[in-house]
Amino acid sequence: MRINQKQIEVFQKKIMKFYEDHGRKLPWRNTKNPYYILVSEIMLQQTQVSRVIKHYQKWITTWSSIYNLADASFEAVLKQWIGLGYNRRAKYLHQTASIICKKYQGNVLDALKDYSSLPGIGIYTSTAVRIFAANEDIVTIDTNIRRILIHEFHLPTTIAFTELKNIASRCLPKGYSRDWHNALMDYGALYLTSKKTGISPQTKQSPFKGSDREIRGLILKQLLIKAQNKEDLKEKLTIPASRLDLIISSLSKEGFLIEENGNLKVKQ
């Protein structure tokens, strides 16, 4: 794509002016602690900012260091996570904390440079934490940033990721990666929305109500209160036994549940 330096400079000024006037005051923007930022990034995956704020603040109060989290029981971690959805993220975060403490002596940034060994951590999360914690001059592209670049530079929605990343790299003001990415995310979330532009995300979230995701969450919520058998759960959740069996089997295989003396309980 032929984008000249003048276009880039105009774009940079536009985004930074919006951020100066409308930037959000979010708790994870008040820290450079890589662990805190890792927690926020994992919580923010497919979850609204307003829901994350309360959970994030409670989380870092309960487990103020990655070592505290690694030493916690999985049951305690899951209980704290309830309400955020996608409970696999809690499991992955707990496992990742343990790996970082044992293999990287608690150094989150070093671990993220080798993110393939960390459960549930991909290129976006690993890069985002390095940007927001260490202000590294690297780029990351979420659904907001993708939409902004496509709209502002009149790019095809089918543009290859490698080409989009090259454009993002050209736009990055060196030495200001943290502020730049915060500004882009706010511009996309608050102003240049998917509804406004008509540019849809590449992946769509499936409906939650009545889904297996909802039922998984309800099962875990019940079992965090106390151990129960399948009949108790079936009565409370009012779903067919065959569907309940499949979901329980899935949760057990993923390491969420164990069965003792005929009762199901959350794994410690």
Image (cartoon, helix red, strand yellow):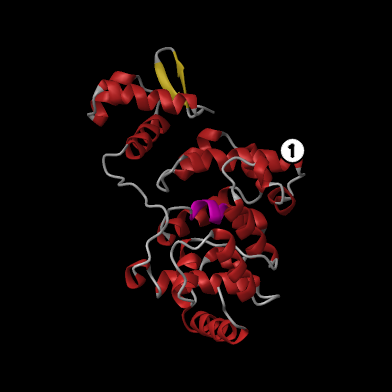
Q: Quadrant of residue 227?
A: top left
User: Residue 22: percent from the left, percent from the top?
Assistant: 46, 80
Residue at 25 percent across and 29 percent down: it is 236
Quarter the C terminus occupies = top right
The answer to whether residue 173 is above or below residue 263 is: below
The residue wearing badge 1 is: 102
203 w.r.t. 102: above or below: below
**As rendered, which of 211 and 221 lies closer to the eye?**
211
Q: Residue furthest top?
A: 261
Q: Circle 1 sits in a helix, a strand or a loop, which is it?
A: helix
Kind of residue at disc 1: Lys
Q: Indicate the position of residue 42 as horizontal and vertical percent values.
A: 53, 51
Q: In x, y percent, where is residue 52?
A: 45, 56
| Point 49% across, 65% down: residue | 146
Q: Nearer the viewer, residue 223 or 168?
A: 168
Q: Which residues are magenta?
A: 39-44
Q: Is residue 96 left or right of residue 46?
A: right
SS assignment for the magenta stretch, majority:
helix
Question: x, y (%) of residue 217?
Answer: 37, 38
Question: Does 43 appear in magenta?
Answer: yes
